[in-house]
Image (cartoon, rainbow, N blue to C red):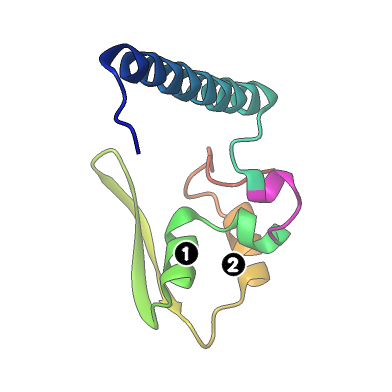
Amino acid sequence: MKPLTVEEAEAKKALLAKGYFFISLVAFTSVLYQVKKGRLDWVASEGLAPDDESKLSPAFQYARMLGVDKATVIRIKGVDVLGSKNYDKESFDATQHVLEEENASIDPERKFLQM
């Protein structure tokens, strides 16, 4: 095998750099397009996540994802503690939890709920 000359190596390096730049530009513009269309959570936008799962608060989603048996979820806004709930893996019902959160007046903004 014949070694590359300096000119050939620089040409290949420039070609690879341009290819990498093009691929990263396409990836970045696709992310911007998804943000513009409002599809940040692609699992929910494609309909792959159940409605109950997407309406859960992030703390309960993480507890379910990590397989935590028991946990206490504390809701904090600023420096105020708004409330706390206990999570038990065996007795947790997602639909009941979503109904309680939608009807609760503790946090009127309820930004984590995707209506």
Amino acid residing under circle 1:
Phe
Which segment did they paint magenta? Answer: 43-49
Q: In this view, does 98 lie to the left or right of 110?
A: right
* Residue at image location 47% in from the left, 54% down from the top: 58
* Residue at image location 55% in from the left, 28% down from the top: 27
C-alpha span from label 2 to label 1: 10 Å
Circle 2: element type: helix
Which quarter of the figure is the C terminus placed in? top right
Image height of 22 relative to 84, above or below: above
Amino acid residing under circle 2:
His
Which quarter of the figure is the N terminus placed in? top left
Which residue position is annotated with label 1? 60
- Residue 85: x and y in percent read 41, 68
- Residue 91: x and y in percent read 54, 86
**Residue 97, labelled with which disc?**
2
Contact? badges 2 and 1 (CB < 8 Å): yes
* Residue at image location 72% in from the left, 57% down from the top: 48
